[in-house]
């Protein structure tokens, strides 16, 4: 199947109100343009230099999402144009993001990554760490970043009940944060969860944004 067909198959499973981020990492500009021609405008990448190179060559109206772990020394490559940073996983990264956004005279929207998987290898904060981050003086001094919600990655497993419980936990974290800190803040609205293998479950558990690569572009 071609990319446009794959895209419409995926889109048919995603309800209105859930944003599809087409994950184009390692894929060519030609492949991205096939999805673009079919109407896709949100694309996700996990390597800053690759993201920067693609942004330079591809249409201006693409919304570029930085979806993976981001090293602080690479924030500068994407700060001028990135639409959403999905996986802020440290105060250091947030501090750098704010600084680079300021240099570019922008406000960058980001999500806080919460560690929901059983694997230690995955990045992210614990819920309690997020609460203390939000309460900190430093957080209050960041004028060039805007918190848009939370992001998480489930355990890589065939155990769909485990995956479901992890997504449910992320949704609970979101709701608690919303209730305790962001009731009046309409910008705090997104839960980025769900990839090719688990996005149906993620949507059932309240995802507002799915990041899908191989189901659209084929295996990497
Ligand atoms: C690669 C990647 C995805 C997409 O994975 P697929 O299994 O190809 O859909 C989603 N999120 C992150 C953070 C990724 O690195």
Image: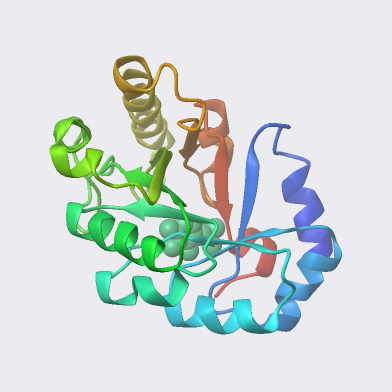
**Residue at 78% of width from left, 50% of height from top?**
9
Colouring used for the render: rainbow
**Residue at 44% of width from left, 18% of height from top?**
184
Q: Position of residue 170 (x, y in %)?
A: 36, 31
Residue 122 shows in the view: no
Left or right of 90: which side holds 62? Answer: right
Circle count: 0
**Residue at 52% of width from left, 79% of height from top?**
52
**Residue at 77% of width from left, 74% of height from top?**
33
The quarter of the picture where the N terminus appears is bottom right
Left or right of 43: which side holds 91? Answer: left
Q: Position of residue 74 (x, y in %)?
A: 33, 76
Left or right of 57: which side holds 183? Answer: left
Residue 203, relative to residue 175: is it above or below? Answer: below
Left or right of 24: which side holds 108? Answer: left
The image quadrant that residue 63 belongs to is bottom right
Residue 42 shows in the view: yes
Q: Position of residue 110 (x, y in %)?
A: 42, 49
The quarter of the picture where the C terminus appears is bottom right
- Most foreground residue, 212 or 54: 54
Q: Position of residue 65 (x, y in %)?
A: 53, 60
- Most foreground residue, 113 or 26: 113
């Amino acid at each position: 199947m071609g990319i446009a067909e794959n895209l419409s198959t995926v889109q048919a499973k995603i309800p209105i109100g859930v944003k599809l981020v087409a994950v184009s990492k390692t894929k060519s500009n030609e492949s991205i343009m096939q999805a673009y021609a079919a109407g896709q405008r949100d694309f996700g990448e996990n390597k800053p230099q690759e993201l920067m190179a693609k942004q330079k060559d591809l249409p201006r109206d693409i919304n570029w999402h930085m979806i993976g772990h981001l090293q602080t020394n690479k924030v500068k490559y994407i700060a001028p144009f990135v639409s959403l940073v999905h996986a802020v996983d440290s105060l250091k990264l947030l501090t750098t993001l704010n600084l680079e956004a300021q240099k570019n005279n922008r406000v960058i929207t980001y999500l806080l990554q919460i560690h929901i998987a059983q694997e230690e290898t995955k990045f992210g904060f614990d819920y309690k760490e997020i609460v203390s981050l939000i309460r900190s003086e430093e957080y209050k001094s960041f004028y060039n970043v805007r918190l848009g919600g939370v992001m998480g990655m489930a355990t890589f497993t065939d155990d769909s009940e485990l995956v479901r419980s992890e997504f449910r936990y992320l949704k609970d974290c979101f709701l608690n944060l919303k209730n305790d800190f962001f009731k009046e803040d309409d910008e705090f609205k997104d839960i980025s969860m769900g990839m090719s293998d688990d996005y149906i479950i993620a949507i059932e558990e309240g995802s507002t944004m799915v990041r899908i690569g191989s189901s659209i572009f084929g295996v990497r």
